[in-house]
Amino acid sequence: MIRQHYQLKEMALIEMGDFVGAVLKHLKKKSIPKVSIVGGFGKISKLAAGNLDLHSRKSTIDLNFLAELSGAKPYLKERIIQCNTSIEALQLCNRHGIDLGNLVCKKALEVAKAYVPQSVTLEVWAIDRDNQKIGFSGSHDFFNLTV
C-alpha cells in the first residue's frame, strides 16, 4: 500500500515485523530523514499504547486503552471494552462518528517520536487486511518536506 502511494521501489521498504522498537532505536544511529510506519490496526494500536514489541507473546491489544482514546461517552466506552478485536472496536467507533483509526495513528506517532531524533520526520498509517488505509497521522506532504 505505501509503496504504491509514494510510487517507491521495493528497495525503499524495510519490513520490521513486530519489532518497531528496534527499528526506532536504530534510527538514532542512522541519518534517515523520513520514515513511514505502516501496519495493521491492531499492531498500530499496540504501538499507540506504548508497546515497542508488537508480537502477541509480548503485547496485547488493550481495549480499555482504545476506549479511553476514543473519547466516547461511558456507555460506548463499555461497549468498546467488550469487543472481541481491535477491528470490531474500530467499526463500532466508526458507526458512532468517532475516527478511532486516526486517533490511534496520532497516538502511535507521539510514542514513536519519543524514540527518534527530532530530525527524523515520521508518519504512521494503519491499514486493514485489504491494505486499505484506515488511519493516518503525519504530514500529508511527507515526500515534499525538505530536510
Image (cartoon, helix red, strand yellow):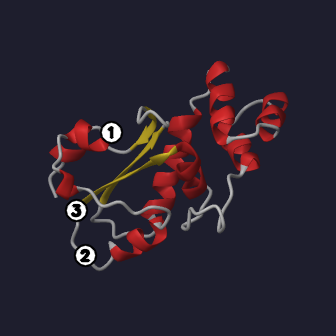
Residue at image position (24%, 38%) is 4
Q: Given the image, on which type of amino acid does mark 1 rest? A: Met
Q: Which mark is residue 1?
A: 1
Select label 1 or label 3 by which is in front: 1
Relative image position of residue 38 (x, y in whole percent): 40, 49
Whether the residues at callouts 3 and 2 have beta carbons within 8 Å, the answer is no
Does the CB distance between marks 2 and 1 fall below 8 Å? no
Q: Is residue 141 visible?
A: no
- For label 2, the residue is 30
For residue 84, above or below residue 11: above
Q: CA distance from mark 2 to mark 1?
A: 25 Å
- Which sits in the foreground, 105 or 41? 41
In the depicted view, which residue is nearer to us: 22 or 107?
A: 22
Query: Looking at the picture, how far across and down is residue 15, in whole percent?
Result: 35, 60
Q: The C terminus is located in which quarter? A: bottom left
Give the position of the N terminus as an image quadrant: top left
Q: Position of residue 80 (x, y in %)?
A: 76, 36
Which mark, by number, is residue 130? none
Label 1's element?
A: loop
Q: Position of residue 143 (x, y in %)?
A: 19, 46
Q: From the viewer's perspective, is residue 45 above or below residue 76?
A: below
* Mark positioned earlier in the residue sequence (1 or 3): 1
C-alpha gap between disc 1 and disc 3: 21 Å
Along the line of sight, the residue nearer the viewer: 102 or 18: 18
| Quadrant in which residue 71 is drawn | top right
Residue under the point 39% across and 69% down: 23
> From mark 3 to mark 2, how far is it between C-alphas?
9 Å
